[in-house]
Amino acid sequence: MAPPEEYRRYWRANLRYLAILLTIWFAVSFGCGILFVDQLNQFRIGGAKLGFWFAQQGSIYAFVVLIFVYVYLMNRLDAEFGVGE
């Protein structure tokens, strides 16, 4: 069994990953879908304005990609701390 300090280091690393990934998701969904929509609407993707596309689809795609990134990072972290499945 790992000492409590190892648990704290593992949990801190996990929270750091979560904070970074959720910040990216917030920036993509809120920033691209709401704040910068007028600037993005100058471009089109598949016939739709880019700002609208980010608000409807882009943030969902970004979230799915971030899920895979989180899985990759956590698998590496689990291997580093020896708590993998």
Image (cartoon, rainbow, N blue to C red):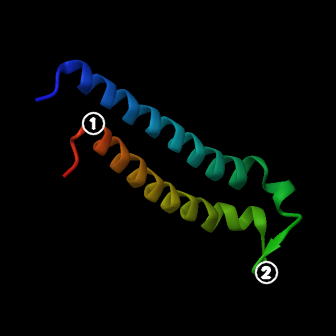
The quadrant the N terminus occupies is: top left
- Most extreme residue toward the bottom is 47
Q: How far apart are marks 1 and 2 (CA)?
A: 48 Å
The residue that appears at 23% across and 40% down in the rendered structure is 82
The residue that appears at 59% across and 59% down in the rendered structure is 59
Q: Residue under label 1, please give it.
A: 81
Q: Residue under label 2, please give it.
A: 47
What crowding class fits label 1: few (fewer than 14 Cα within 10 Å), some (14-19), or many (20 or more)?
few
Q: Position of residue 70 (x, y in %)?
A: 43, 50
Up-down: is 8 above or below 51?
above
Look at label 2 and name its amino acid: Gly
What crowding class fits label 2: few (fewer than 14 Cα within 10 Å), some (14-19), or many (20 or more)?
few
Q: What element carries label 2?
A: loop
Residue 5 image-quadrant placement: top left
Residue 23 image-quadrant placement: top right
- Please name whichever residue, 1 or 47, is drawn nearer the observer in this view of the structure: 1
- Most extreme residue toward the right is 42
Look at label 1 and name its amino acid: Phe
Up-down: is 79 above or below 4?
below
Up-down: is 38 above or below 31?
below
